[in-house]
Amino acid sequence: MTAGYKNIFTAEPIQWAVDYIQDILETLEEGAIDSDYGLALLALEREELRVILQELQQDVPKVDTPVFCAYGRQGARLFVIRQLLSTLPAVEHCPLHSRDHVYSQACRRLLDESFFLSGFRLSLEKKAPSPETVSRALRILAGSRLAGRLRLNRHPLHLYCLNYELPDPAYYLLPSHTIICGANDFDAHTQLHCLLHEFGHAIYAAKPSVKPAVERKKAAEQFANHFAAALLTSV
């Protein structure tokens, strides 16, 4: 199925991803007679997406840093492919769950991802944080010796600044350990504040916790608020 979608290299990336998910779901609805067959189809899609990601990464400099940053259309392509890979189930799924459960959850995640991406609106006037604003945020973290804590299980944090208006100015997405910043009309200081807030979420994600999901989400928001405020006052 993905072979017909190599036009991600020329298409508008977000709409490409929404259409791609819709095609997957329609194919599964029409042809997946059981969860085994459905998971086999999704496994094939995952491998095709990995090939596309490798092609996209050929032009990306290999630098071992705690944060990988990308902007513009190239950033949008990398973002959607990594999001799709984080949404599709791994080839070896958790033995604690049945294949029916894994398949059901995969379809639900695809629906959720389609809904999320459908809220993106390409902007010609508003802009995402500039590389200069991102560099300033990273210098603040480095000055406080916090940059190294942005890795999650040794994996670097991915940061994408994209010229799409989003439902919220920015998000930290745990499954792919990614921050996405959208287009807005904020001044540079407010954009810096938003970036530091999301960096706070990324650092909090690495903290072990036994709290229920609702309580952990609330605690993460409080931590990110205090984290950004404290760093800004030290500038």
Image: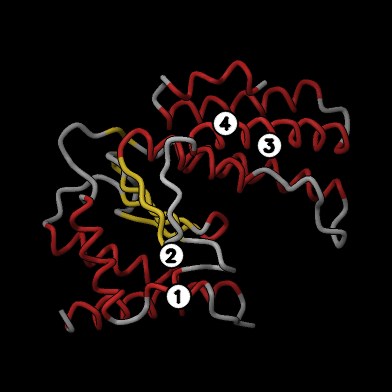
Asked if residue 94 is positioned above or below residue 11 in the image, the reply reads below
Neighbour tally class for label 1: few under 14, some 14-19, many 20 plus, Cα within 10 Å: some
Amino acid type, mark 4: Ile
- Whether residue 67 sits left or right of residue 30 in the image: it is left
Q: CA distance from mark 3 to mark 2?
A: 26 Å
Residue 211: x and y in percent read 60, 81
In the rendered image, the residue lying farthest to the top is 4
Rendered residue at 15%/35% (across/down)? 125
Residue 100 x/y as whole percent: 85, 46
Judge left or right: residue 136 versus residue 24: left
Residue beneath the point at 53% across and 38% down: 81
Between the residue at mark 1 and the residue at mark 3, the CA separation in whole angstroms equals 29 Å
What residue is at 38 percent from the left and 79 percent from the top? 222
Q: Which residue is mark 2?
A: 66
Task: Indicate the secondary structure of the residue bearing disc 3.
Answer: helix
User: Could you tell me residue 164's position as x and y percent?
Assistant: 30, 39
- Cα gap from disc 2 to disc 4, whole angstroms: 23 Å
* Scheme of colours in the image: secondary structure
Q: CA distance from mark 4 to mark 1?
A: 29 Å
Q: Nearer the viewer, residue 217 or 229?
A: 229
Q: Which mark is residue 46?
A: 3
